[in-house]
Structures are given as structure tokens and as C-alpha cells.
Amino acid sequence: MQLVSEARVELGTEPDIVRARQLVRKLAQDTRFSLVDQTKLVTAASELARNTVKHGGGGYMDMQLLADGGRQGIRLHFVDEGPGIADLDQAMTDGWTSGGGLGLGLSGSRRLSNEFEIQSAPGEGTRVSITRWK
Amino acid sequence: MIDRIPILQIGDFLLITIQVDMHDQLALQLQDDLTARIAKTGARGVLLDISTLDVVDSFIGRMISNISSVAGVLSARTVVVGMQPAVAITLVELGLSLPGVQTALNAERGMELLRLAMDEEASGDAVGQ
């Protein structure tokens, strides 16, 4: 697997969530993802960017364009140094929320991606990576 | 940056067309503004046009649900119109089915639904008298 390009987007405030959505949309369009695939990736990115801003106290998103044999993919890493998640299984459950939301952010973005990875521990922040292949 | 989404009044109905990629605060502001407008005008129906939205995530989805519920409590019916097919597919996969939210394919059909609902209510009132 080959890394074609990479860019970092800061996620500190709510408008950064909108900006992240727009940049992911642009990359998915340039990579010629189908409209449905674009929408799924952008929606997942929006959920995870919001988590980074609201629960992680801010952080960043790394956008990577990948090539693997004949196929292309987009991988997004959402990284914060916030309080972290103590019970990952619980956090991944539909409808479970630490407050305010619908509790679909993590579980929903996993369903919208081809690959999903999460690393988190109390006091050590959270890192979520999703990949969608064309 | 836009900080308010305009709400238009057409007779007994309020019309909202969301034409920007909404940040969270803007969505919350719309919810507040709309509730105030319904209370002030006594509007009977709300047409929420989301045809230009290319992303509806769980936050915006919840805002749409909330608007519909709050308007209902204030005795106004909400119809959400114009959802893009890719957005609908994504919403369902995300796990959000917008329960209790009435939808229509486009603004014309949405308006028809609102008028029908008003006519039914009017004839229901007449029978009750």
C-alpha cells in the first residue's frame, strides 16, 4: 500500500467541523468517489470531527490518499489528547452517549466506513481511523 | 460567516430553505428562531427544504427531529422536503431514521401535504361543532 498524499486539518472549534467536511468532500470528489460513497465518507468525517472538537477538547484530522494495487482509498485519522474513553465497547454501542448527542457518532461512522480502528484510554486521548476504498 | 437562516412566511405556513453547510450553532439558532416565529405568527405548517444539503449527520438529523417535535407541540405540522438520495441512503446506514418526521419528495408535494392536513383539521372542527 502506498501513501499518495497527506494533509492535516486542525480541529479546534465548530466551524472547523464544517471545514473538515468540505476538505474531505473535495478529496473524495477529486478521487472520483461515487456520490453515495462521498456522502458516506463526509458524514462519517463529520461525526468523528465533532467528537474530536466536543469530547476530545480539540485535535486534528489527517487525510491520506492511498493506492493499493489498482484501487484508491481515503484514510482519515482523528486525533485528540482529551480525556479518552474508558469503556470502548460501551462507546461503540448504538445509542450510548456521554451526553447531548444521539450516540451514533462512533457506531454510525464505523458502519459508513470500510475499515475502522479506535485506540483510546483514560487520560491518553483518542485516535480513530477510518478508510473508505473506491 | 452566516449566523442566521431566514424564515419566510407564506400565509399560514413558514418556509425555511437551508442553503449553507450548517455549523452546529447555526442549527441551534434556527431551532430557536423557528419556535419563536411559530409562537408569534400562529403558523400551522412548516416546510423545511433541505434539497441543497449534501450532508446530514447525526447532529443535523437531531435538529430536524427536534424542530418537527417542537413545532408539533406548538400545533404546527412540519414537512421536510427535498432530501438528496445519497443523503437518505447515508442517514439510514448511520442509524438515523428520523422517526416522527414527515417527509415529501419536493416542495410542491410538501405544500400539498400541509394544505391537506389543514383542510382535514378544518372539516374535523366543523363536525365537532
Image (tube, rainbow, N blue to C red):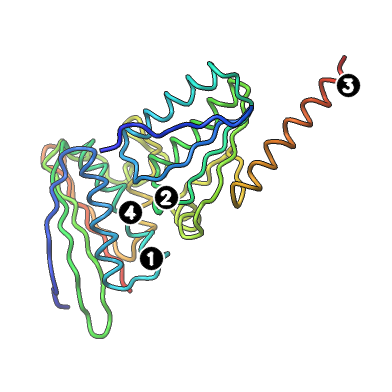
Horizontal side of residue A134 vs B17, given as left or right: left
| Callouts 1 and 4 on one subunit | yes
- Which amino acid type is shown beneath numbered disc 3? Val
Residue at (38%, 59%) from the top-left corner? A39
Q: Position of residue A54 (x, y in %)?
A: 23, 36
Q: Is disc 2 in contact with disc 1, using a CB cutoff of under 8 Å?
A: no
Residue highlighted by disc 3: B127
Describe residue B103's horizontal placement relative to residue B128 as left or right: left
Instruction: State the SS at label 1.
Output: helix
Residue density around tag 3, few if under 14, some if 14–19, many if 20 or more, within 10 Å: few
**How far apart, in angstroms, are the residues tagged by discs 3 and 4?**
50 Å
Residue drawn 46% across and 60% down? B86
Mark 2, secondary structure of its residue: loop
State the image coordinates of residue A62 (x, y, percent, origin top left): 15, 57
Identify the secondary structure beneath mark 4: helix
- Circle number at residue A44: 4
Are discs 4 and 2 less than 8 Å apart at CB? no
Chain identifier of the residue bearing label 4 in the image: A
Q: Amino acid at mark 2?
A: Leu
Horizontal side, residue A42 vs residue B14: left or right? left
Tell me the chain of label 3. B
- Spatial distance from mark 3 to mark 2, Cα to Cα? 42 Å
Q: Tag 4: residue type?
A: Ala
Marks 2 and 1 sit apart, C-alpha to C-alpha, by 16 Å
Who comes first in sequence, dot 3 or dot 2?
2
Q: Quadrant of the N terminus of chain B?
A: top left
Indicate which disc residue B53 carries.
2
Crowding near the residue tagged with mark 1, few <14, some 14–19, many ≥20 C-alpha atoms within 10 Å: many
Residue denoted by label 1: A37
The spot of residue A116 in percent (x, y) is: 28, 59
Q: Position of residue B95 (x, y in %)?
A: 46, 49
As drawn, A57 above or below B53: above
